[in-house]
């Protein structure tokens, strides 16, 4: 499936909470999502990176993703601003450091198999966020209980 493109406003329920963007369910429908899904986000031509697209729940038929202060500053957006959004589905494939451990260490494979889908996604995101290869490997090993 191709990217989703739409315009909307940046929202925030309270100053102590993160900003977020609401995505109408009808826009997401072609992707046939059933649960939280990693996406690559661009806001008004500024790449934001990976975010988790989540179903709102509680009576609203919409999806949303959070924005950090740093991401908002990078894109030059604030609460109430109209933004152009582009969402692309991100790869569900684990990072190379995790794959290597899964292929070469039976303890890593057992730990991975015991994780829920959400925990696997969080571990992979933590590994991907590290810039240095040594840090990525260390996070993968720690996340799989190998250190």
Image (spheres, grey):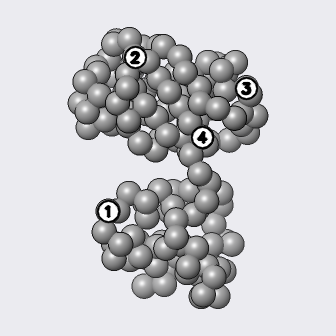
Looking at marks 4 and 3 on the same chain, the residue that comes earlier in the sequence is marked by 3
Residue that label 2 marks? 83
Residue 41, position in %: x, y?
A: 46, 34
Rendered view: 96 above or below 7: below
Sooner in the amino-acid sequence: mark 3 or mark 2: 3
Which SS class for mark 2? strand
Residue wearing tag 3: 29
Please give the residue where the numbered disc 4 appears in the rendered image: 89
Report, in whole angstroms, how far the alpha carbon at label 1 lies from the one at label 2: 28 Å
**How many residues crowd around disc 4 within 10 Å: few (fewer than 14), some, or many (20 or more)?**
some
| Residue 104 can be seen, yes or no | yes
* Quadrant that contains the N terminus: top right
Q: How crowded is mark 2: few (under 14 residues within 10 Å), some or many (20 or more)?
A: some
Q: Which residue carries the number 1 mark?
A: 131
Q: Quadrant of the C terminus?
A: bottom left
- The spot of residue 121 in percent (x, y) is 56, 56
Report helix, strand or loop for mark 1: loop
> How packed is label 1: few (under 14 Cα within 10 Å), some, or many (20 or more)?
few
- For the point 47% across and 56% down, which residue is it? 125
């Amino acid at each position: 499936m191709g990217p989703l493109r739409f315009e909307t406003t940046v929202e925030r329920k309270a100053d102590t909470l993160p900003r977020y963007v609401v995505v109408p369910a009808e826009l997401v429908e072609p992707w046939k999502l059933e649960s939280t899904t990693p996406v690559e986000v661009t806001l008004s031509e500024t790449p934001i990176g990976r975010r988790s697209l989540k179903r709102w729940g509680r009576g609203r038929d919409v999806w949303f993703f959070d924005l950090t202060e740093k991401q908002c500053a990078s894109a030059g957006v604030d609460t109430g601003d109209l933004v152009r959004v582009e969402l692309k589905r991100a790869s569900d494939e684990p990072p190379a450091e995790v794959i290597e451990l899964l292929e070469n260490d039976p303890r890593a494979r057992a730990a991975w198999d015991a994780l829920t889908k959400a925990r696997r996604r969080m571990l992979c995101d933590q590994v991907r966020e590290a810039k240095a290869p040594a840090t990525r490997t260390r996070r993968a090993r720690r996340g799989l209980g190998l250190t």
